[in-house]
Image (spheres, coloured by chain):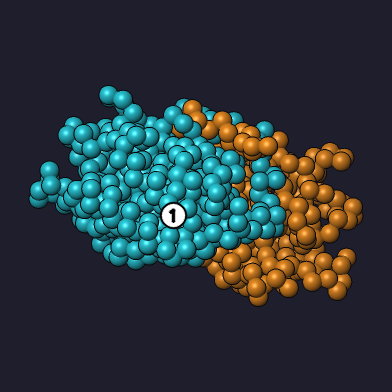
Chain colours: A orange, B cyan
Amino acid sequence: MENLTRIALLQARAEASYQANLEKAVSMIREAAALGAKIVCTQELFTGYYFCQEENHDWFATAEDAREGPAAKALGPLARELGVVIISSIFERRMAGLYHNTAQIFDASGELLGLYRKMHIPDDPCYYEKFYFTPGDLGFRAWNTRHGKVGVLICWDQWYPEAARATALYGADVIFYPTAIGWHPKEKAQWGAAQHSAWETVQRGHSVANGCYVAAVNRIGHEVLPTMPGSDGIEFWGQSFVADPMGKVVASAAADEERVLLCDLDFTQVDSTRTHWPFLRDRRIDAYAGLLQRAALG
Amino acid sequence: MENLTRIALLQARAEASYQANLEKAVSMIREAAALGAKIVCTQELFTGYYFCQEENHDWFATAEDAREGPAAKALGPLARELGVVIISSIFERRMAGLYHNTAQIFDASGELLGLYRKMHIPDDPCYYEKFYFTPGDLGFRAWNTRHGKVGVLICWDQWYPEAARATALYGADVIFYPTAIGWHPKEKAQWGAAQHSAWETVQRGHSVANGCYVAAVNRIGHEVLPTMPGSDGIEFWGQSFVADPMGKVVASAAADEERVLLCDLDFTQVDSTRTHWPFLRDRRIDAYAGLLQRAALG
């Protein structure tokens, strides 16, 4: 495994059709590989609009099998052809009545190394994910890919220090966060800057606390679902970024551009940061039982 | 308990004598109270120089009893006289051979509500704290003071999301961090900005992840210990700050000024932030067992 690895974050605008999104992702992955990227990650649920803006049973028909569906059939062979690790975020149909928000981790050999099923599921106006997704049952993990030790978490997970820590303790040198987050258009003027800043800050905090890289891959575009004409929709705020092990933003994209965002990671920085700031050495694992409680009071 | 509470962070330069530091703290607390502050917090180990720059047995003689020592005798009555909550950080002698880095929490009645003994103890060049301080055995807590629900953590704790979360789960609306952090003079040019940014960022991240206020109280001054003439010493970087429940810095001091830093906290913001971003609702306490492990591998 090399110490210097170029990664690519695929920040895109969603198209109406599954096929168009898959073709765009394939095209962006080819571009990323041509530019030297070795690990590529899509935005969350990259195969379609962010349908969780409503609770509509029709959307379940867009889910797919994580091992045998069209994304797996396209991206596994593509990973092998290009020799790149691909992390792709899809709507998984596990069986009738059981769906997850899932990331596939394809090694550069094309093998599906594993799945990460989103553990923390939001439910907020226009983000009705609890209607669609059963919370993940595979826990937190990291994978030794050909090009790096990679952890994967998804969107709402990014607000949880527990998720980042548990992933880091599995040896992740970089944690990818496929994401779909944006502004409610009516809130943007008053709250938009503070919301975006909080989102970036908490993830930079994860990189500091864990001495590892963090890579957040968000979508762009103002999406008004075809099933909800006249609704306000969500204005996805893009601004995908990579933070280094000291929390510095070392690559970032704009709020409104489709972008293959490249960043060179130096995994020796994980080692040197953690020896200079040895937080892992001093964790009080004897005193963290309270973290397994809902609250300490009441 | 009121919803609007003015707090004061006492950012000071350490003097050579215990008595001078205690008198300065008393003076700053009086000033803070006169300016309307209801909760006041000192910097870490406010009664002296940051002696952990060396391992020298003589410094043990400067420790004191947390309940009956001179700081308790001065600050308890002062809290009662002024009607303010006082959080003071001292070098505690618990018994022969047993010392802690401890914060006292005095309610506005003058009562010593409790102690927080620093749980995470660093050991780094010029920060040889493991030589002096036994890691705390009182765990993470919060206290219902007359003027707010207050959590206290100390310096090295600020790099640990576990500590902030455990404290928040006890109901803290604001977490105070008495601190003594600075630059090695020879590292400052190359690393100083990145180190300070990481320190501020990880704590702002705690405020976002927990939807509460965070208040970091650091010292200033370039301290070369009288027992180490000719050493480089540490240049403490001040820059005490308060972050609101969305991680925004709402008050901050400079790197080189003594300052009674005031900030008005609106505890209703904790409630509204947490209902709009309900992270606590969705914690996966069934899946956090890995946090109680040293690492998941090896």
Horizontal relation, residue A195 to residue A71: left or right: left
Q: Residues within 10 Å of mark 1 (few under 14, many from 20)?
A: some
Q: Residue furthest top?
A: B96
In front of the other: B107 or A202: B107
Label 1 secondary element = helix
Q: What residue is shown with label 1?
A: B82
Horizontal relation, residue A258 to residue B100: left or right: right
| Residue type indicated by callout 1 | Leu
In front of the other: B208 or A277: B208
Query: Where does residue B242 sit, x and y in percent of width and height?
Result: 47, 59
Q: Residue furthest left?
A: B230
Q: Number of numbered discs present?
A: 1
Against A99, residue A241 (above or below) is: below
Q: Residue furthest front?
A: B81
Q: Quadrant of residue A108?
A: top right
Horizontal relation, residue A241 to residue B225: left or right: right
- What residue is shown at x 55% (from left), y 49% (from top)? B146
- What residue is shown at x 80% (from left), y 66% (from top)? A16
Residue B272 visible in the shown view:
yes
Residue B167 visible in the shown view:
no
- What residue is shown at x 68% (from left), y 37% (from top)? A298
Against B91, residue B212 (above or below) is: below
- What residue is shown at x 72% (from left), y 68% (from top)? A184
- Marked residue chain, label 1: B
Against A13, residue B137 (above or below) is: above
Quadrant in which the N terminus of chain A appears:
top left
Query: Where does residue B116 sit, x and y in percent of width and height?
Result: 44, 38
